[in-house]
Amino acid sequence: MTAPEPQRLEILLVDDSPTDVRLTQEALHDEDVPHRLHVARDGEEAMDFLRRADPLPHVVLLDLNLPRKDGHSVLQEIRDDEALRSLPVVVLTSSHADEDVLRSWDLHATGYVTKPVVVDHLVGVLRRIGVADEVVRLLP
């Protein structure tokens, strides 16, 4: 009989930059965050994933500058969808522009983290917003 797999954080990372995806993967791995990372390369792919996901991820890490459907449009679509609206969405972007920050909050982003990813900061945001408390307690 094998031991049950420890709980892990299910994350959807929506980012079209292979470099940023790799850096996020490395940051999560280096900090021993128990997780499974799903990656969507654009806004359309993200919405397709979310509409099919069972179960939903614990959190969406959403870049704003995406092809086909930008991050703000994805966030708006998530908030307009009854089945998805309570899903925590942390905007993960290189933008420090006041307009992007304010629009993200207006669309009810759960958090806003600027790149490059600093895992301690991201984990702090996840703890503050109470994402998957049963999993977050396993985080460093």
Image (cartoon, grey):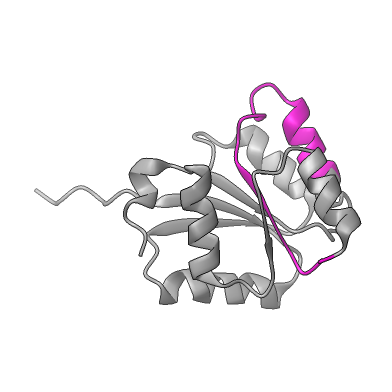
* x and y, in percent, of residue 124 in the image: 49, 59
Pick the residue in front: 48 or 108.
108
Residue drawn where x is 65% and y is 38% of the image: 50
Question: Residue 18, located in which quarter of the rendered image?
Answer: bottom right
- What number of labels is visible? 0
Residue drawn where x is 90% and y is 55% of the image: 99
Is 14 situated above or below 129?
Answer: below
Q: Is residue 117 visible?
A: yes
User: Left or right of 16: which side holds 32?
Assistant: left
Q: Is residue 10 visible?
A: no
Question: Residue 62, located in which quarter of the rendered image?
Answer: bottom right
Magenta-drawn segment? 73-96
Pick the residue in front: 96 or 49.
96
* x and y, in percent, of residue 30 in the image: 42, 77
Q: Residue furthest left?
A: 1
Question: Residue 24, located in which quarter of the rendered image?
Answer: bottom right
Pick the quarter of the image with the C terminus: bottom left
Look at the image and say whether residue 112 sits in the magenta stretch. Answer: no
Pick the residue in front: 4 or 97.
97
* x and y, in percent, of residue 39 in the image: 63, 58
User: Left or right of 56: which side holds 31?
Assistant: left
Residue drawn where x is 74% and y is 71% of the image: 17
Look at the image and say whether residue 74 sits in the magenta stretch. Answer: yes
